[in-house]
Amino acid sequence: MINIIVVLPKLEDAKGIRGILMKNGFQVTAVCTTGAQTLSQLDDLNDGIIICGYKMTDMIYRELHDCLPKGFDMLLMVSQHMMNECMDNDIICLSMPLKVHDLINTVDMMSQAILRRRRKAKQAPKARSAEESALIKEAKELLMNRNNMTEEEAHRYIQKCSMDSSTNMVETAQMVLAMMRS
């Protein structure tokens, strides 16, 4: 599910946008009238889309955008004559009066981009802690000293043993150290 928050100064307008989105299969996480309300909604969320107008009661869109955590995208609904002022690489704009088709297609495009980022983040290799790196380095050094291996050979040996035993390299390094120390 993509988190969508609609922020407009008039609650009825925000609820109207929420209704349009929900009729088209999107789940709206919150409806807000101020930037402060919006920011408080973000505490438990990792990513999502903020749909807002140019001005809320307590801030303008740029101030809200600058406070958004990484992972949140902004869709700004703005009048045609304000569009040039609002064009920014980080903010997607739709001109008012709003066409439902354009809103739905834009939110769908933004949702797909967030889903791609999530998939990419899941596929990224996990960074090793300093402890884990030190453990692997110690195992490589032990193999290099006892078996006259180069660092590359020791690394490949740990890597191959890791794949053969279906364990990660840290666990394999621990096994190498335990076996060679005893």
Image: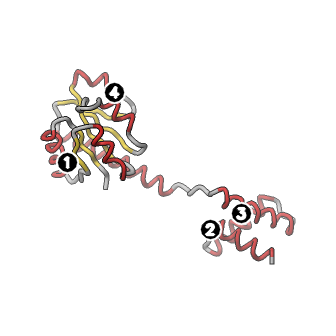
The residue type indicated by label 2 comes to Asn
How far apart marks 2 and 3 lie (CA) works out to 12 Å
The residue type indicated by label 1 comes to Leu
Q: Which residue is mark 1?
A: 21
Task: Check disc 1 and report its element: helix, strand or loop.
Answer: helix
- Residue 174's place in the image compared with 103, above or below, is below
Task: Check disc 4 and report its element: helix, strand or loop.
Answer: loop
Image quadrant assignment for residue 32: top left
Count neighbours of disc 1 (C-alpha within 10 A) and say few if under 14, some if 14 to 19, many if 20 or more: some
Q: Which residue is mark 4?
A: 87
Residue depicted at 34% across the width and 49% down the height: 112
Q: Position of residue 6 (x, y in %)?
A: 24, 43
Q: Which residue is mark 3?
A: 135
Q: Position of residue 9 (x, y in %)?
A: 19, 35
Q: Position of residue 8 (x, y in %)?
A: 21, 37
Residue depicted at 24% across the width and 29% down the height: 55
Residue depicted at 80% across the width and 78% down the height: 182
User: Do tag 2 and tag 1 residues touch (Cβ < 8 Å)?
Assistant: no
- Residue 127's place in the image compared with 76, above or below, is below
Most extreme residue toward the bottom is 182
Q: Earlier in the sequence, mark 2 or mark 1?
A: 1
Disc 3 or disc 4, which is closer to the eye? 3
How far apart marks 1 and 4 lie (CA) works out to 24 Å
Q: Is residue 113 left or right of residue 160?
A: left
Between 148 and 22, the one nearer to me in the picture: 22
User: Do tag 2 and tag 3 residues touch (Cβ < 8 Å)?
Assistant: no
Count neighbours of disc 3 (C-alpha within 10 A) and say few if under 14, some if 14 to 19, many if 20 or more: some
Residue depicted at 24% across the width and 53% down the height: 27
